Image: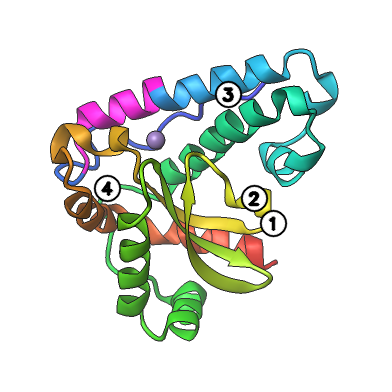
């Protein structure tokens, strides 16, 4: 059974950037529902229940057609949000140093260029989706994805993602996605993103 991970900080820990009520609903309702519906989808498939979430998503093409969309949407939602909570934190923001900082400079020219690229990509996701920093074939890449599509489904490792579904920002920012994105940069817990990078790089 997949489980909702507890938030590694209090609901109000990301104030003023992300408000406590949004965090409470987003984690306790939206993410919780993805977990419940993923478990529902897998309930008659004991062979798939033993797989890690990453393996399930990497192997999405092999998931039986009758539950493939449910696994894609709810499994993707579970994976995406689990990473999202971990890569934010109180006192976050700034820019990464160390191996991740070096890799970002190498791939995008500078941290500011990377920041602009991810912001523009996330701003331009049409409707609901995510902006991502991923490692694909050993290279850092910025990409936008619709819905809860997980980068794992296309063989890329997600390192940092920003949720641009309206439920992520509507209470505080209404339709102002760019304001939310600007605030989100001040929450990033770069030490965790670096862990994700080192793990994906192997
Ligand atoms: Mn969400």
Depth check: 70 or 202 in front?
Answer: 70
Q: CA distance from mark 3 to mark 2?
A: 19 Å
Residue 189 picture quarter: bottom left
Q: Which residue is mark 3?
A: 3
**Can you say whether 145 is above or below 32 in the image?**
below
Task: Check the picture and name the quadrant holding the C terminus.
Answer: bottom right
Please indicate, yes or no, whether residue 159 appears anywhere in the rendered image: yes
Q: Which residue is mark 4?
A: 90
Q: Position of residue 35 (x, y in %)?
A: 55, 23
- Left of 10 or right of it: where is 54? right
Q: Position of residue 103 (x, y in %)?
A: 51, 78
Locate ligand 1 by image quadrant: top left
**Can you say whether 90 is above or below 166 in the image?**
below
Q: Which residue is mark 1?
A: 155
Where disc 2 sits, the SS reads helix
Q: Which residues are magenta?
A: 18-29
Q: CA distance from mark 1 to mark 4?
A: 31 Å
Q: CA distance from mark 2 to mark 4?
A: 27 Å
Where disc 3 sits, the SS reads loop
Magenta stretch contains residue 21? yes
Magenta stretch contains residue 41? no
Q: CA distance from mark 4 to mark 3?
A: 24 Å
Q: What colour scheme was applied to this rendering of the protein?
A: rainbow
Sequence-wise first label, 3 or 2? 3
Depth check: 131 or 85 in front?
Answer: 131
């Amino acid at each position: 059974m997949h489980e909702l991970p507890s938030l590694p900080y209090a609901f109000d820990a990301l104030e003023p950037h992300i408000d406590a009520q949004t965090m409470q609903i987003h984690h306790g309702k939206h993410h919780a529902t993805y977990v419940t519906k993923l478990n529902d989808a897998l309930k008659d498939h004991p062979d798939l229940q033993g797989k890690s979430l990453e393996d399930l998503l990497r192997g999405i093409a092999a998931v039986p057609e009758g539950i493939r969309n449910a696994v894609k949407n709810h499994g993707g939602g579970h994976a995406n949000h689990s990473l999202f909570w971990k890569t934010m934190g109180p006192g976050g923001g700034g820019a990464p140093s160390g191996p991740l900082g070096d890799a970002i400079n190498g791939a995008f020219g500078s941290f500011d260029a990377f920041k602009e690229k991810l912001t523009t990509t996330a701003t331009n996701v049409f409707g609901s989706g995510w902006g991502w920093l991923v490692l694909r074939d050993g290279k850092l890449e910025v990409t936008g994805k619709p819905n809860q599509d997980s980068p794992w489904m296309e063989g890329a490792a997600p390192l940092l993602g920003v949720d641009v579904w309206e439920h992520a920002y509507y209470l505080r920012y209404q339709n102002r996605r760019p304001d939310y994105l600007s605030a989100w940069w001040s929450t990033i817990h770069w030490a965790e993103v670096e862990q994700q990078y080192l793990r994906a790089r192997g």
